[in-house]
Amino acid sequence: MPEIEAEPAHLIGAIERASTLFPERGISLMDRRGRLAEKRSYPQVLESAQAAARRLLRRGVEAGDRVMICLPTSWSWIESWLGTVLAGGVPVAVSPPEGLGSPSGVLGRVDGVAERIEASLLVCSDRLLAPIHEHRLETLSTIATPIGELEELLPGASLPRLDPAPEEVAFLQLTSGSTGVPRAVMIPHRAAVHNTIACGEAIGRPLGRPVWEWEPSSLVSWLPLYHDMGLVGGILFSMMNGLDLVLVSPRTFLGKPRTWLEMLSRVGPAISPAPNFGYQLCLERIAEEERAGLDLSQWQVALLGAEMVRPETVRDFSAAFESSGFSPLSARPCYGLAEGTLSVTFDSAGTGLRCASLPAGAEEGPREVPSVGEPLMDTRVEVVAADGSRLPEGQIGEVIVRGPGVFLGYFRDEEATAQAFRDGWLHTGDLGFLRGGELYLTGRSKEILIVRGQNIMPHELEWIAEEVAEAGGSCRVGCFSIPAGAAGELPVIVVEVARGAGSSLAHLDREIRSRVGRRLSLPLADLVFVQRGKIPKTTSGKVQRRELRARYLARQLERLHGDE
Amino acid sequence: MAMSEKTDKALQVLARVSDKDGAGLTPEMELVADLAIDSPKALELLVELEEVLEVEISDEDAARMETVADVLAYAGRLG
């Protein structure tokens, strides 16, 4: 096995290093049935990314230019993203419209991002050009370049020899922002390199040696490449640690979850990450008789991250797939966020899920709290009270992080950056407590609704409802999420209406649900109309979403019905 | 709506994916808002439709499916 060389200084070095250090390994792209479509070794990946970089230069991309990539999981995605890095640009992956319904809602959001980050290029599927012009999306209309057109360009001469500083921005990662338009997290080269190496070290700890010293092993991923878990946890992690990356599109997994487990049955020793809902989906959609024929005995590490880990999901999954060879010891929770590049803590014990009970006096939280492990190497995690003072072990507070994996700030958003960074510590907004040096997460950032792994800011839903109800002036709208069975969480919207609006409630109900569905592909758990003034607000008029949620759950909201 | 064999199959898939009774589905119902078909379910629906209708549904066709009627019309065009 190759010895690990000194960490590369930047991502360009990391991409080249994969090609020289792990020439036999590479990336396999699977087709829609989860069968191998094409494998490229890391030298081939590098070569195709260099060709893409030269085409991007020919297209006029300059150093530091933001290049947005809006493509499904494909070689074109990989070449465009890595190629942008090699060309000295800053790649920004955005979620492509997928599934049912018109792409206009998704494209509208992409347009907002493009404007905010002053992107110079959007690499997109050929089919998106028509809707972009049809919906008169100002920024996108001028920068959209269909991938087909880009791939026909003759590559420019040669690539410049680049040597970016560790603190230079390597890429932008989009995350939900409080203003409706996603924020762009600036990840420096230093963080991208450190975080992926540190994860390799933490994953390998129970086996006594880091991942890069393992016998040939694969990383199987269906996670979307615009998400940090798919990009950093899939592509960059595999390249840095010399794993064979086996990639299938999220569409394939979501359409047929068994495909994921079939792939894991075939590839031999493997690591595979997923958010909690991925495991839950397998439980819901793979019937008992379909479990026969699966062999999960080679699944060494089943990572769980990106959203709250539910102990019952892990236990049910372990029980359901035990006869297929799944070992409960392979379940390894971790915790991270885009602002931390990918991971902050990692279960490095490898002894299966461990839970603690919720500390006495805690306001709310799950009864059983799973450990998400210890901080990665060189990383510090503390828990603080609202006034910023450090809390002792066992007390719940906000999780703060310091270390080389932490981001630089939000792109051109000093206010948000100042809020996130205080005295050099990243304030995550997530809640938890420490015990025995491990982090126990009790709640993710209060504001964000995590529905099926997708982060949604409550005001995105509130604005849609306000638009329809023409509330927002003296009438308000509040939104929060509630547990909705095995599906995890779904949103509830509460709308204040003026007296006498009774006759139009049926229409409002229909219109709000319809617009939320069309724009965010999201069904509602409930839609409640209440009399004006019934939504709890702060003295400054801000909707108190937590209090509203508590009243809703206690059935203290007086609903208005259509005939009132 | 006239039901061909294909539209009938599509209706059965819709009913199964949305956990509803086929007779309770009306053409104007919206897939997301009324049938609670979120993104994962949407992809499940597409895969199941592809299997029973024996076609590969293009992104363009998927983009036109917003209501029960849209899905049935798509299946109907297949004959």
Image: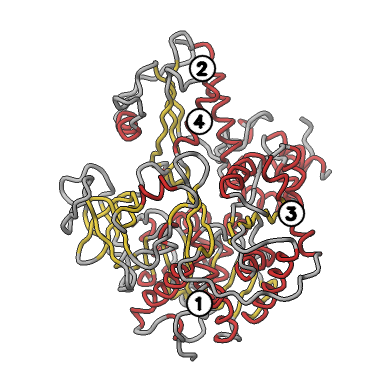
Mark 4: which secondary structure?
A: helix
The residue identified by callout 1 is A240
Of B8 and A404, which appears nearest the observer? Answer: A404
Task: Answer left or right for A231 relative to A564.
Answer: right
Instruction: Tell me, yes or no, whether dots 3 and 4 are on the same chain.
Output: yes
Mark 1 vs 4, N-terminal side: 1
Q: Amino acid at mark 3?
A: Thr
The residue identified by callout 4 is A463
Q: Between label 2 and label 4, give the one nearer the viewer.
A: 4
Tell me residue A182's x, y (percent).
51, 46
Gap in angstroms between the C-alphas marked 3 and 4: 31 Å
Q: Chain of mark 2?
A: A
Q: Which numbered marker is on residue A552? A: none
In the image, residue A284 sits, relative to residue A478, either above or below, namely below
Q: Between label 1 and label 3, give the one nearer the viewer.
A: 3
* Residue A486 appears in the picture as rendered: no
> Which of the image's four quarters has the C terminus of chain A?
top left
Gap in angstroms between the C-alphas marked 2 and 4: 18 Å
Mark 3: which secondary structure?
A: strand
The residue identified by callout 3 is A145
Tell me which corner region of the image, top left, top right, bottom left or bottom right, holds residue A313: bottom left
Gap in angstroms between the C-alphas marked 1 and 3: 30 Å
Q: Amino acid at mark 4?
A: Trp
Q: Residues within 10 Å of mark 4 (few under 14, many from 20)?
A: some
Tell me residue A552's x, y (percent).
34, 29
Tell me residue A212's x, y (percent).
46, 82
Mark 1 vs 3, N-terminal side: 3
Q: Chain of mark 4?
A: A
Q: Which numbered marker is on residue A505? A: 2
Mark 2: which secondary structure?
A: helix
